[in-house]
DNA sequence: GCGACAG
DNA sequence: ATCTTGTCGC
């Protein structure tokens, strides 16, 4: 892949902000960047195309066929990547952050932060079309390919079995896990109050994920496999990455970098 | 028709 | 997601 000039900026948290290869994602053939306009529409008379749900759903169904729900570890995990997105106050710009941590110790190795125009509205079930393009660029800007990516959103616990974690995992072909803060679909009981307790998240008669307690007495998180992943491994990874707080360190650090109020 | 609805 | 400080409780 052709790489753009290496750009380094900022030094917040002592983290690198290196951005390589800022090319746009090629995974939206029918919907090149801007085909829906920018969101929200700029004051004046900028037109935004209505989202053709049938076509977008078709793209999800198509990509869903590439999801693999088995593991493919090439040895022990060495790195875990956290990704998250934040928005400008007026909602017109999206900031994507990718942070690479050492799996053991969870120390930060490097991070990439970049901004882009928002080109898709927020629609439950279509979050990945709004955030994946920018997150994809951020992850590809890292100096090395992560062994696994933890996403702030659902994996297969999704209306069409293709949440943000699946989308990112597939287009990057990297194992991924979805760790969402709230439920999108499915039913479940309350997991026991202790850390590590979990109950199945069921949807349409299938177990699509787990409602996992990462911290005693605190609201659980919704874990589901994204790509090249199994639920047991997803749960173990989540617990490993969330040793002290409700959310995984991966997500917490990516969030700190992507939050608009902080940073730039 | 009436809710629900990742971030 | 974002607008926003202190405050009640373990």
Image (spheres, coloured by chain):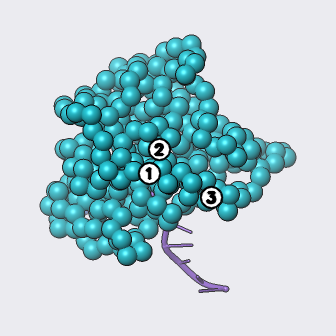
Chain colours: A cyan, B purple, C blue
Instruction: Give whichever of discs 3 and 1 has the lower sequence position.
Output: 3
Neighbor class of circle 1 (other Cα within 10 Å; few <14, some 14-19, many 20+) is many
Neighbor class of circle 3 (other Cα within 10 Å; few <14, some 14-19, many 20+) is few
Circle 3/circle 1 CB separation < 8 Å: no
> Where is residue A67 drawn, in percent x and y?
44, 51
Q: Nearer the viewer, residue A134 or A230?
A: A230
Q: How many marks?
A: 3
* Secondary structure state at the residue bearing disc 3: helix
Q: Name the residue rendered at 48%, 25% in the picture.
A: A141
- Of the 4 image quadrants, the one containing the N terminus of chain A is top right
> Where is residue A231 drawn, in percent x and y?
28, 56
Q: Which mark is residue A58?
A: 3
Spatial separation of the CA atoms under disc 1 and disc 2: 6 Å
* Secondary structure state at the residue bearing disc 1: loop
Circle 1/circle 2 CB separation < 8 Å: yes
Which picture quadrant has residue A77?
top left
- Are the numbered discs 1 and 2 placed on the same chain, yes or no? yes
> Where is residue A106 drawn, in percent x and y?
23, 32
Q: Name the residue rendered at 22%, 33% in the picture.
A: A75
Q: Name the residue rendered at 24%, 46% in the picture.
A: A237
Q: Nearer the viewer, residue A20 or A54?
A: A54
Q: Which residue is mark 2?
A: A170
Spatial separation of the CA atoms under disc 3 and disc 1: 15 Å
Side of A75 where A167 appears, left or right: right
Please determine whether, in this image, residue A40 is positioned above or below residue A137. below
> Where is residue A183 drawn, in percent x and y?
40, 64
Q: Which residue is mark 1?
A: A67
* Secondary structure state at the residue bearing disc 2: helix
Circle 3/circle 2 CB separation < 8 Å: no
């Amino acid at each position: 892949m052709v790489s753009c000039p290496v750009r380094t900026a900022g030094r917040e948290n002592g983290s690198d902000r290196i951005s390589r290869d800022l090319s746009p994602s090629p995974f939206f053939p029918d919907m090149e960047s801007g085909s829906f306009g920018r969101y929200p529409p700029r004051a004046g008379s900028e037109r935004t195309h209505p989202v053709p749900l049938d076509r977008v759903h078709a793209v999800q169904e198509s990509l869903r066929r590439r999801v693999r729900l088995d593991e493919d570890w090439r040895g022990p995990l060495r790195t875990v990547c956290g990704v998250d997105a934040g928005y400008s106050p007026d909602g017109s710009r999206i900031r994507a952050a990718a942070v690479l941590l050492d799996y053991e110790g969870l120390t930060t190795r490097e991070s990439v932060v970049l901004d882009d125009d928002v080109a898709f509205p927020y629609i439950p079930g279509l979050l990945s079309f709004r955030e994946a393009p920018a997150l994809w660029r951020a992850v590809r800007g890292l100096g090395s390919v992560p062994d696994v990516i933890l996403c702030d959103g659902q994996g297969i616990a999704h209306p069409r079995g293709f949440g943000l974690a699946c989308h990112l995992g597939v287009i990057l072909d990297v194992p991924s896990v979805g760790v969402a803060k709230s439920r999108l679909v499915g039913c479940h009981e309350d997991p026991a109050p202790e850390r590590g307790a979990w109950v199945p998240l069921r949807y349409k008669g299938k177990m699509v994920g787990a409602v996992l307690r990462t911290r005693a007495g605190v609201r659980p998180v919704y874990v589901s496999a994204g790509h090249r992943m199994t639920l047991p491994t997803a749960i173990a990874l989540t617990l490993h990455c969330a040793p002290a707080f409700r959310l995984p360190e991966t997500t917490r650090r990516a969030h700190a970098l992507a939050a608009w109020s902080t940073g730039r």
